[in-house]
Structure formats: structure tokens, C-alpha cells
Image: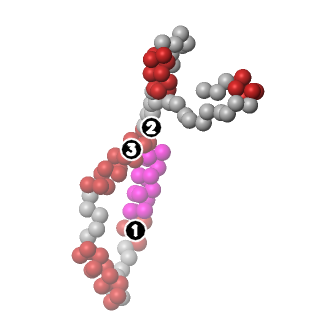
Amino acid sequence: MTSIDQLRSGQPLETSRTNQNDLHSTLVKEGSSREVLQPRSDAFSISDQSRAIEALNQQMANEIHFDSTKVAAIKAAITNGVYKVNADKLATNIMKYEDEIRSLK
């Protein structure tokens, strides 16, 4: 580590980085009387919302996402002009989706 005296004297600076584990083992090997730095440990926690999102991701991963037969039938109905949208069912599903999103907040 560069001291203030080295900076003032114009000596070249050391540019390599040392992590705390390396510094700890160096101080112990040299038998230094300086205070020994303990390795730092990092921690994190996951919020309840993150857990809920992960649960939904797992649930979706276990579901079948694509029904090629159903898609082909819908494409054919659209092409033939006979596809009908059930507005009540669509509105109900949109509201259900919105309620699910609100419950995650």
C-alpha cells in the first residue's frame, strides 16, 4: 500500500491490488505486529416480493406454454373469417390478470 510519504517523495506508485485474504496471509507470514485484518464476508437477503416472483417463475416453468393444435385452429378461424372474440371472457381474464399483479405489490 502506498503511504503519504511515498506520494510526496515522487516515488512510483504500486498499482497492483491486494484483497483482504492476501493481506491477512501476508501479515501473518511476516510476523507483523500490525493489526491483522479479518476477511470480510458479504451477505444478501431476498425480499418477499422476490420470493413471490420466483415462485411464479417456477410455476410457469412447470406449465405447458404452447399448444400448437390450438394455435393452428385459431389461425385457420382467423383466415376463414369465422374467429369470434368473446368480449366478456376477455374482460374477465384481463381483470383476473390485473388482480394477480396487484396482489404481488
Q: Residues within 10 Å of mark 2 (few under 14, many from 20)?
A: few
Between the C-alphas of marks 1 and 2, the distance is 33 Å
Quarter of the image that includes the N terminus: top right
Compare residues 5 and 104 and report the one nearer the observer: 5
Compare residues 23 and 81 and report the one nearer the observer: 23
- Who comes first in sequence, dot 1 or dot 3? 3
Between the C-alphas of marks 1 and 3, the distance is 26 Å
Report if residue 64 lies within the magenta region.
no
Q: Residues within 10 Å of mark 3 (few under 14, many from 20)?
A: few
Q: Which residue is mark 1?
A: 90
Q: Residue at x 46, y 26 (%)?
A: 21
Between the C-alphas of marks 3 and 2, the distance is 9 Å
Q: Residue at x 38, y 62 (%)?
A: 93
Q: Is residue 25 above or below residue 70?
A: above
- Who comes first in sequence, dot 3 or dot 2? 2
Residue 40 is tagged as none
Give the label, 1 or 3, closer to the camera: 3
- Tell me the amino acid under the disc marked 1: Leu
Q: Which residue is mark 2?
A: 47
Compare residues 33 and 20 and report the one nearer the observer: 33
For the residue labelled by badge 1, is the local secondary structure a helix, a strand or a loop? helix
- Tell me the amino acid under the disc marked 3: Ala
Figure quadrant of residue 85: bottom left
Q: Residues within 10 Å of mark 1 (few under 14, many from 20)?
A: few
Q: Residue at x 42, y 66 (%)?
A: 91
- Tell me the amino acid under the disc marked 2: Ser
- How would you classify the magenta stretch by its main secondary structure? helix
Q: Which residue is mark 3?
A: 52
Figure quadrant of residue 74: bottom left
